[in-house]
Image (spheres, rainbow, N blue to C red):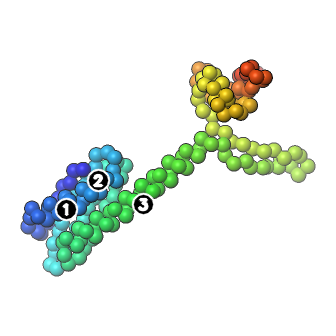
Amino acid sequence: MQINVTFRHLDSSPGLKEYVNKRISKLAKYFNGPVEANVILKAEKFRQQAEVSIVGDGFNINGKEETGDMYEAIDLVVAKLETQIKKFREKRKSRKKSAGKEFEPAPLTIEEISEEGPEIEVERVFVKPMSVEEAVEQIKTTGQNFLIFNNSETDSVNVLYKKGEERYVLVIPELS
């Protein structure tokens, strides 16, 4: 993690800079890739202000705190940033989990064509690209009787179903 510290209306002190580096570097455990932290320390009359901007690894997080003591302001802004990072990571995890659910069949919905007509169950299925050999292995491992897949060799949607013990039928749709 690269940390840039800027002092405004305040004398640069090695102790303060070291304290900022120590506190901000603790946030590095939340990131996987390269991250840059820009810290601005300001002093205006009796107010001490710490402003931090962290960019990288898909994050863009900002925090600002103002107190009477610079060290306290740094601690408060780091705590605020840590809360924001945790919240953002949870959102990212939940998005990945919900994105993973796209590959599972959607729950069944029942729609009626008309009041007198039959009920039709609609099941949405993610069509995964694979070869015919991979589709056969998928049927064997899952124990299903059929599989709808996108044939990677022909780039068309095919259906493979089991007919007997070791016999399979590949349905290839053709336009008339």
For label 3, the residue is 87
For the point 82% across and 49% down, the residue is: 112
Q: CA distance from mark 3 to mark 1?
A: 23 Å
Name the residue at the right extreme: 116
Q: Tell me the SS state at disc 1.
A: helix
> Looking at the picture, which amino acid does disc 1 mark?
Val
For the point 42% across and 55% down, the residue is: 89
Q: Tell me the SS state at disc 3.
A: helix
Residue count near mark 1 (Cα–Cα under 10 Å), binned few <14, some 14–19, many ≥20: many
For the point 41% across and 57% down, the residue is: 88
Check whether the beta carbons of the residues at disc 2 and disc 1 lie within 8 A of each other.
no
Residue 70 relative to residue 161: left or right: left
Q: CA distance from mark 3 to mark 2?
A: 16 Å
For label 2, the residue is 28
Where residue 134 appears, as percent x and y from the top left, is: 60, 25
User: Which image quarter: residue 12?
Assistant: bottom left
Q: Is residue 85 above or below residue 174?
A: below
Disc with the residue nearer the chain's start (3 vs 2): 2
Disc with the residue nearer the chain's start (3 vs 1): 1
- Whether residue 123 can be seen here: yes
Where residue 124 appears, as percent x and y from the top left, is: 68, 42
Check whether the beta carbons of the residues at disc 3 and disc 2 lie within 8 A of each other.
no
> Looking at the picture, which amino acid does disc 3 mark?
Lys
- Whether residue 7 can be seen here: no
